[in-house]
Amino acid sequence: MIQRAIPSSLRRVLDLQESGEALIGFLTISHASLAASIRVASDGVDYVWLGETWIGFPFKFAILSDGEAGPRTQIEVQNVDRKIGDALRSITTPARVQIDILAASEFDETADPRTARGTPLVAYSAKHLFLTNVKVDPLVVTGDVVSWDYTQDTWPGRRATQDRCPALYR
């Protein structure tokens, strides 16, 4: 089971029947073939967090599944200027993905781009993920976000054979 440390102050606000609080998703897509990581925020405005600028680029995602199979979800990013679609189409192996969710109140909403107030508390973070089954069309980029499925590893992964480790057999 994945432990999630949602700050109690944020949990109280989110549990209200009506709340003025909004959650912002921060998506990072990285790959060795990309010149720079793709960083987008699910809001329509830009954000500065962790010394990086996150482009306001609405996208859809769900929290990772937490069942018997490996964690997975789907993601959908608008292909507005085709940069993201072209970048993902150019790579041949799965890209790395990280999703962080923070409360909008952790940022100065009067600044452009919006900047973090102090050190924001991350409400949810999913790291060490991979983007697979990417589909790109003129309007949207979709893909599956998956974790490494350790149940598919053979055990032992490598054997100490005479060909591989000749010094063991002297």
Image (tube, grey):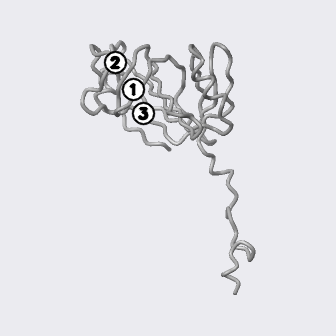
Quarter location, residue 168: bottom right
Of 36 and 24, nearer the camera is 36
Within 10 angstroms of label 3, few (less than 14), some, or many (20 or more) residues? some
Q: How many marks?
A: 3
The amino acid pointed to by label 3 is Tyr
* Cβ atoms under marks 1 and 2 closer than 8 Å: yes
Within 10 angstroms of label 2, few (less than 14), some, or many (20 or more) residues? some
Which residue is outermost to the right? 163
Q: Residue at x 30, y 21 (%)?
A: 105
The amino acid pointed to by label 1 is Thr
Judge left or right: residue 122 versus residue 140: left
Distance between the alpha carbons at the discs numbered 1 and 2: 8 Å
Distance between the alpha carbons at the discs numbered 2 and 3: 22 Å
Label 3 SS: strand
Q: Where does residue 26 sit, x and y in percent of width and height? A: 44, 27
Observer-side mark, 3 or 1, equals 1
Q: Residue at x 70, y 79 (%)?
A: 166
Q: Where does residue 136 sit, x and y in percent of width and height? A: 67, 21
Quadrant in which the C terminus appears: bottom right
Q: Which of pointers 3 and 1 lies earlier in the amino acid sequence?
A: 1
* Vertical placement of residue 50 versus 68, above or below: above
- The residue that mark 2 highlights is 113
- The residue that mark 1 highlights is 53
Of 40 and 147, nearer the camera is 40
Judge left or right: residue 21 versus residue 43: left
Q: Which of pointers 1 and 2 lies earlier in the amino acid sequence?
A: 1
Label 2 SS: loop
